[in-house]
Amino acid sequence: MQHRNEVHASRFILWLSILTFFSVMNETMFNVSLPDIAAYFHIAPSAANWTNTCFSLSFAIGVAVYGKISEHTGMRKLLLFGMLTYGFGSVVGLLGHAWYPGVLAARFLQGIGASAIPSLIMVMIVKVVEPGKQGKAFGLIGSVVAFGEGIGPVIGGAVSGYMHWSLLFALPLLSLLALPFVLRTLPDETTEGKVFDMTGAVLLSAGILSFALFTTLYHWIYLTASLILFAILALHIRRHREPFLEPFLFRKQTYLVGVILGALLLGTVAGFFSMVPYLMRAVYDMPTGLIGSAILFPGTLSVILFGMLGGMLADRRGHIAAMLTGLSMIVAGFLVVLFYTDRAPWFIAASMILTFGGLSFVKTAVSASVAGTLEENEAGSGMGMLNFACFLAEGIGIAGVGGLLTKPWLDSPLVGTVTSQTAGLYSNMMLIFMALVAFGGTLFVMFYKRNSQG
């Protein structure tokens, strides 16, 4: 009987890993193809970047929504809905790739569907895997996540470079093959039947979308609409008995500072990540396949190595030491691109390794520092909101960079080592990235150092 349960759990983790791999890979797979999409539709980067922004925004909203719904709806239903939506979005993208609004709709649907996996995965492991084997299961899933993020640009570059970017929509359909096996291994469950705050979810989603449009188009009407929607949401939270966002989290100052500054740092690096394919295409005329395999892949793969080192450093020297190490690596990576934008492609590849290696340390420091501000009964809601904020910031960062790449006032080189007019735009962008990282990182270290001493 025990052997049968172990086999059952092993098969469950195997199929769950396959779902996780395809869910995570889609976050980075399209990034390398953004210049191809811009050229195909004859649109500016500010528009093309919404291919990724739509996915990131709906993914962030989905993470928050699934987490809430799972409190009163069975996981089996949510997982089935999420994966079928993911598959439907992929089909829409395949069939409607010649119409850009269709591509955006497909990516939005993919984000809604794919977000079901990270939202439910922790709960599913706890319910299916016995306590003594859960650590191994979480470790395996973490490795799959890192590998999916790392291999995404390589696969995306190969498919786009040697076939066509629209075929990237076909790859997620393979994940549906694992769905029947995961559903069959999930246990039956009872639900509490709580009321879901749909109004709060809609207000939050609309406010986020309006703000993202402002970061791309810079029309004040979008910012105004966003502020009005968030004000209505704040009023709604006060009056609703069980609001979509937990009110007690907004009263924890240290927690909120960590979430906001952590999201700022992650959003900035995501924006940089989305800029690199444009840089390599414009400055070096590099093909898509080579951008994915030679430039982006080494950086995303370094996340695995530095992620482990970041955890060890945080345990031995503390979260502030991990944060300072990560910030130093990110700034060093940005400086390489700032001064050597048009010198040689390997400089950019080295910058990616430094930047994403530093990001691993920053992620570890942010997660550990924010978790330390929460009580045991607040951990679920608190860490869920942190994940939501970080996914959201990544989407807004990608949208904002797309808008900045179209601004003529950034074209003239400001650094003497950069001689190419084309490279000047990307070199100057690094000054903005460095300012954001320095601002967010300095405030984070100062605030948490003061609180740890107090």
Image: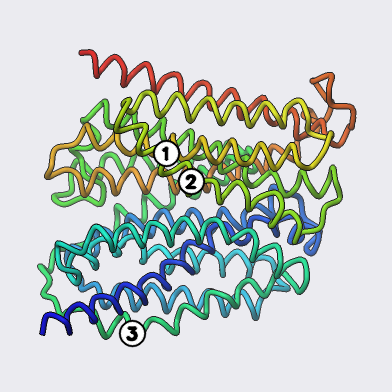
- Pinpoint residue 133: horizontal percent, then vertical percent: 20, 64
Image quarter of residue 135: bottom left
Name the residue carrying label 1.
Answer: 309
Please name the residue shown 66% across and 36% down the image.
351
For mark 2, give the secondary structure.
Answer: helix
Name the residue carrying label 3.
Answer: 181
324 is higher (above) or lower (below) than 400: above
336 is higher (above) or lower (below) than 109: above
Q: Nearer the viewer, mark 3 or mark 2?
A: 2
Which amino acid type is shown beneath numbered disc 1?
Answer: Leu
- Pinpoint residue 443: horizontal percent, then vertical percent: 41, 19
126 is higher (above) or lower (below) than 328: below
Query: Do tag 1 and tag 2 residues touch (Cβ < 8 Å)?
Result: yes
Who comes first in sequence, dot 3 or dot 1? Answer: 3
Which disc is residue 169 wearing?
A: none
Q: Quadrant of the C terminus?
A: top left
Is residue 398 something one can see in this rendering? yes
Image quarter of residue 153: bottom right
For mark 3, give the secondary structure.
Answer: helix
Separation of residues labelled 3 and 1 (CA atoms): 35 Å
- Pinpoint residue 187: horizontal percent, then vertical percent: 17, 79
59 is higher (above) or lower (below) than 422: below
Looking at this view, is 185 or 429 the one in front? 185
Name the residue carrying label 2.
Answer: 305
Please name the residue shown 46% across and 67% down the image.
21
